């Protein structure tokens, strides 16, 4: 029976292109549906407590991600330089407008729709599992890392949806696009996507995740999406210097 099940699983994930990323997106959507169903029955006091707990946990996750840094100066210049470029390009405004457009198009009444979609997208996309898993699948291997990430994201989306709302489910779109892009270019990128590069990207992503935690806790209002160029700078710095 186990051998038969393994054969079916291997057949599904082996035939369908980017199957790991598709599975990841589906579990985020499923988790969001569960969270919205359960969350509507919870009192505001409990929802507020969950929100605070999520904020603290996300900050811890960010600090843990920064530990992968192999070069403090690269992380500093990437984060600061990326933030400056992002502010100049006003990425946050562009993404916020997209969130508002999606909200109007779908006739959503959730005031936190855009914030939830952007925050959840950044959390799910900036970790090393997203990068490593997508590369693994792109190289023709079984997407074990993405399957593990899918379970983690699916469970966390339940909690996020309770506190942040339906926008969490729409982060699945960003996850699917981001991870598929890495998967489909993995053969070309594999030469430079070494451990050093991935660790540098993860460390800068960790700083962004800390900022998201601060936003959720209401401590600050940081335009985290404007920090996205920092991940690209970190990758370039680690690959060529």
Image (cartoon, helix red, strand yellow):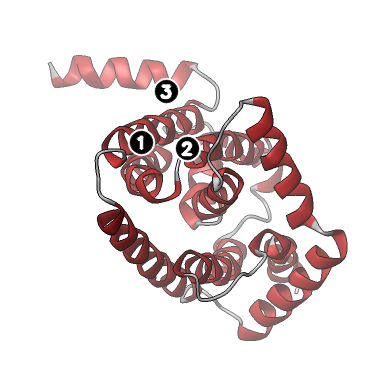
Mark 2 or mark 1, which has the lower sequence index? 1
C-alpha distance separating marks 2 and 1: 7 Å
* Nearer to us in this view, 209 or 230: 209
**For residue 13, which numbered disc appears in the image?**
3
* Nearer to us in this view, 32 or 106: 106
* Nearer to us in this view, 108 or 210: 108
Q: Choose top left, top right, bottom left or bottom right for residue 240.
A: bottom right
Q: Could you say whether the residue bearing mark 3 is in a helix, strand or loop?
A: helix
**For residue 166, which numbered disc appears in the image?**
2
CB of mark 2 within 8 Å of CB of mark 1? yes
**Residue shown at 27%/58% (left/top)?**
45
**Residue at far right of view:** 88
Disc 1: which residue: 36
Instruction: Describe residue 21's horizontal placement relative to residue 10 as left or right.
Output: right
**Residue shown at 35%/21% (left/top)?**
10
Q: Could you say whether the residue bearing mark 2 is in a helix, strand or loop?
A: loop
Instruction: Describe residue 129's horizontal placement relative to residue 118 as left or right.
Output: left
Where is 216 relative to 74, above or below? above
- Looking at the rendered image, the quarter that the C terminus falls into is bottom right
């Amino acid at each position: 029976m186990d051998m038969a099940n393994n054969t079916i699983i291997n057949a599904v994930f082996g035939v369908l292109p980017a199957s790991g990323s598709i599975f990841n997106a589906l579990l985020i959507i499923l988790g969001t549906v569960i969270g919205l169903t359960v969350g509507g029955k919870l009192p505001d006091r409990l929802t507020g407590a969950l929100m605070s707990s999520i904020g603290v946990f996300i900050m811890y996750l960010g600090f843990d991600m920064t530990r992968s840094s192999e070069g403090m100066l690269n992380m500093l210049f990437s984060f600061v330089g990326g933030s400056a470029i992002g502010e100049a390009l006003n990425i946050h405004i562009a993404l916020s407008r997209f969130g508002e457009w999606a909200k109007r198009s779908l006739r959503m009444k959730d005031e936190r729709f855009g914030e939830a979609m952007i925050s959840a997208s950044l959390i799910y996309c900036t970790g090393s599992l997203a990068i490593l898993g997508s590369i693994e699948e792109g190289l023709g291997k079984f997407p074990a890392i993405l399957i593990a990430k899918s379970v983690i994201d699916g469970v966390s989306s339940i909690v996020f949806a309770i506190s942040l709302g339906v926008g969490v489910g729409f982060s699945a779109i960003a996850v699917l696009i981001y991870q598929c892009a890495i998967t489909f270019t993995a053969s070309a990128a594999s030469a430079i996507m070494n451990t050093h590069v991935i660790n540098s990207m993860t460390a800068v992503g960790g700083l962004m995740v800390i900022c998201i935690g601060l936003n959720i806790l209401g401590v600050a209002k940081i335009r985290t999406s404007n920090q996205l160029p920092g991940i690209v700078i970190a990758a370039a710095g680690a690959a060529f210097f």
